Amino acid sequence: DPFKVRLEFSARDYLSMLVVLVLLVPLRFCVALISLVLAWAVSVLGLHNTDVTVPVTGWRATLQLVSCFFGRVCCYCCGFSVTITGCRVSKSEAPVLVAAPHSSFFDALAIFWSGLPFIVNREENKDLLFIGKCVQFAQAIFVSRDDKDSRDKCKQEIRKRTKGSLPWRQFLIFPEGTTSNRKALMSFKPGGFLPGKAVQPVLIKYHLAHDTVSWTWDQSHGFIACFLYTICQWRNDVELIYLPPYNPSPEEQENSVLFANNVRSVMAEALNVPVCDMTFEDIKQKYSKKKQQ
């Protein structure tokens, strides 16, 4: 089951987490909070009297990178040690970065280590304390999953930014549109493949003794426990693997679903995991019924 997570810790594991909780977590929390507040302040300053519908330039572009740096600091404060394998290419070679598997809110580290490409984000995240302003300043495209007009506008904006002449950064997308435990790749939504441009797959590999990072549909612990279990580890190793760019064929340029499926196959083979054709709507319906029962 790609959506099931159950954690089992030994007495030694609990003792180790207790030591980290006492010795490191207060320091990690303070530094992360300071970094988050600074990122928010930088974002508020950068957003003042600016038009986020066009790429920011000059000192505001520098502030975006400063905000990105604070994002990395927050990841370090959660114990993450990030290793890069492969080479991220420029926008001219691949305007779109395709990141998978998507299993956690911690996957945001792929954004910070990819130079702050713009992303698609939920409309509700605009109002998150501190984080909302940071996401707005990163010039994310906001979308409501349940609103067809919002989804259509999102697709149009993706095309405009990736195919236009304005100096937008690369576009990074988590095409599965939902989270799993990384044991399979879910169906890829075609939005990031609509422009018909080259994409660069980015694999996210967590090398952990216990899967504390996954936050998915079928697990006995929630967001807070997920965060605490992770931050109470001495070290959380994660690897970002940049595969060679994938250049679509003429058929794939005309058929975004075919393009998405073929890129998913390449990524699944590299990860040595199967594919799962359940969509977000299928998963939501299945687990909503389970909870009701």
Image: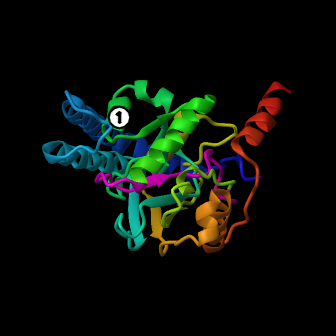
* Residue 120, percent from left and from top: 48, 43
Viewer-proximal residue among 55 and 273: 55
- Residue 224 located left or right of residue 189: left
Residue occupying the point 37% across, 49% down: 75
Residue 15 covered by magenta stretch: no
* Residue 272, percent from left and from top: 66, 72
Residue carrying label 1: 136
* Residue 123, percent from left and from top: 49, 29
Q: Amino acid at mark 1?
A: Gln
Q: Where 51 sits versus 99, above or below? A: above
- Residue 171 located left or right of residue 256: left
- Residue 104 located left or right of residue 261: left
Viewer-proximal residue among 165 and 139: 165
Q: Secondary structure at mark 1?
A: helix
Magenta highlight range: 163-185
Q: Where 189 sits versus 30, above or below? A: below
* Residue 19, percent from left and from top: 42, 46
Viewer-proximal residue among 293 and 68: 68
Magenta: main secondary structure:
loop
Q: Where 268 sits versus 286, above or below? A: below
Other residues around mark 1 within 10 Å, as few (<14) / some (14–19) / many (≥20): many
Residue occupying the point 58% across, 52% down: 175
Residue 16 visible in image: yes
- Residue 133 located left or right of residue 215: left
**Which residue ends up furthest to the left in the rendered image?**
59
Q: Where 115 sits versus 5, above or below? A: below
Viewer-proximal residue among 53 and 223: 53
Question: Quadrant of residue 225 in the image?
Answer: top right
Residue 165 covered by magenta stretch: yes
